[in-house]
Image (spheres, rainbow, N blue to C red):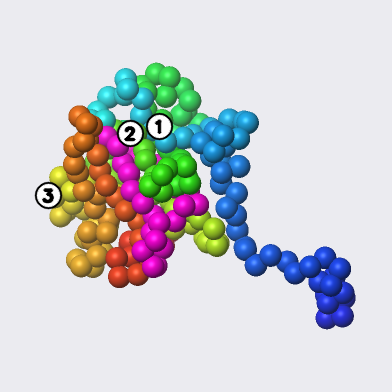
């Protein structure tokens, strides 16, 4: 396209917005959460009350490089059940009805007063010998062209964490960015896992 033609189009229609991606998550992927009038296939409930295992809540805030909460992020998690087994995506609806465990969750940070993400799930079992229990996390937000991938480990699994090959491959001074801290509130086990996209506390992200 010639420079003159591009200039003419810009004059007629205005400059193309600089925002490269979304966020379209609220409308396309978390519609019910944001009160759009159609369903969403997954939400923040990964395990229903009848699922086996220790029921937990995973929660946290996504922070930008200045330490401010990001209110338009979307978080997806994928995990094994309490026995260390994964549910295939195609079997998730049937598994949810039978076992109460879906294996996958998705939520945005834009409807919570504290800009948190929260998932109700069960603590996963180890996938195999030498591996620590963990949850896979995908982070998406405005301006990101590629998803960010990370993992959640658990603060009360110190011995397993010390043997996990993925966690041990991370520089020692940065491993704590992958460890969720356990607490109890209102009779519920809560693991806190804040995600820092940049800055001195930047979470470790994996190149997948």
In the image, farthest residue toward the bottom:
3
Q: Secondary structure at mark 1?
A: loop
Which tag, 2 or 1, sits closer to the chain's start? 1
Residue interval drawn in magenta:
56-80
Left or right of 190? Residue 74 is right
Mark 1 residue crowding within 10 angstroms, few (<14) / some (14–19) / many (20+): many
Residue at position x 19%, y 44% from top? Answer: 182
The image shows residue 169, relative to residue 25, as above or below, that is below
Can residue 1 be seen from the camera position used here?
Answer: no
Residue tagged 1: 45
N-term-proximal mark, 1 vs 3: 1
In this view, the residue farthest toward the front is 113
Mark 2 burial class by Cα count in 10 Å: few <14, some 14-19, many 20+:
many
The residue nearer to you, when weighing 99 against 174, is: 174
**Nearer the viewer's eye, disc 1 or disc 3?**
1
Secondary structure under tag 2 reads strand
Instruction: State if disc 3 and disc 1 touch (CB < 8 Å).
Output: no
Q: Indicate yes or no whether the magenta region holds residue 87.
A: no
Q: CA distance from mark 2 to mark 3?
A: 23 Å
> Which numbered tag is attached to residue 159?
3
The residues tagged by marks 2 and 1 sit, at their Cα atoms, a distance apart of 6 Å
Residue underneath mark 2: 121
């Amino acid at each position: 396209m010639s420079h003159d033609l591009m200039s003419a189009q810009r004059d007629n229609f205005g400059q193309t917005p600089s925002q490269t991606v979304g966020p379209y998550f609220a409308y396309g992927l978390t519609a019910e959460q944001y009160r759009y009038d159609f369903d969403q296939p997954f939400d923040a409930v990964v395990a229903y009350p009848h699922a086996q295992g220790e029921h937990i809540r995973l929660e946290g805030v996504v922070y930008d490089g200045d330490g401010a909460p990001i209110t338009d992020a979307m978080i997806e998690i994928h995990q094994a059940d309490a026995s260390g087994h994964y549910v295939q995506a195609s079997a998730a609806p049937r598994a949810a009805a039978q076992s109460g465990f879906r294996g996958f969750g998705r939520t945005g940070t834009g409807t919570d007063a504290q800009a948190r993400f929260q998932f109700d799930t069960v603590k996963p079992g180890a996938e195999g010998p030498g591996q620590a229990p963990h949850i896979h996390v995908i982070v998406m937000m405005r301006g990101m062209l590629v998803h960010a991938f990370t993992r959640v480990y658990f603060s009360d699994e110190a011995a397993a964490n010390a043997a996990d090959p993925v966690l041990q491959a991370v520089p020692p001074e940065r491993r704590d960015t992958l460890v969720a801290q356990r607490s109890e509130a209102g009779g519920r086990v809560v693991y806190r896992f804040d995600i820092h996209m940049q800055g001195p506390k930047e979470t470790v992200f994996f190149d997948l």
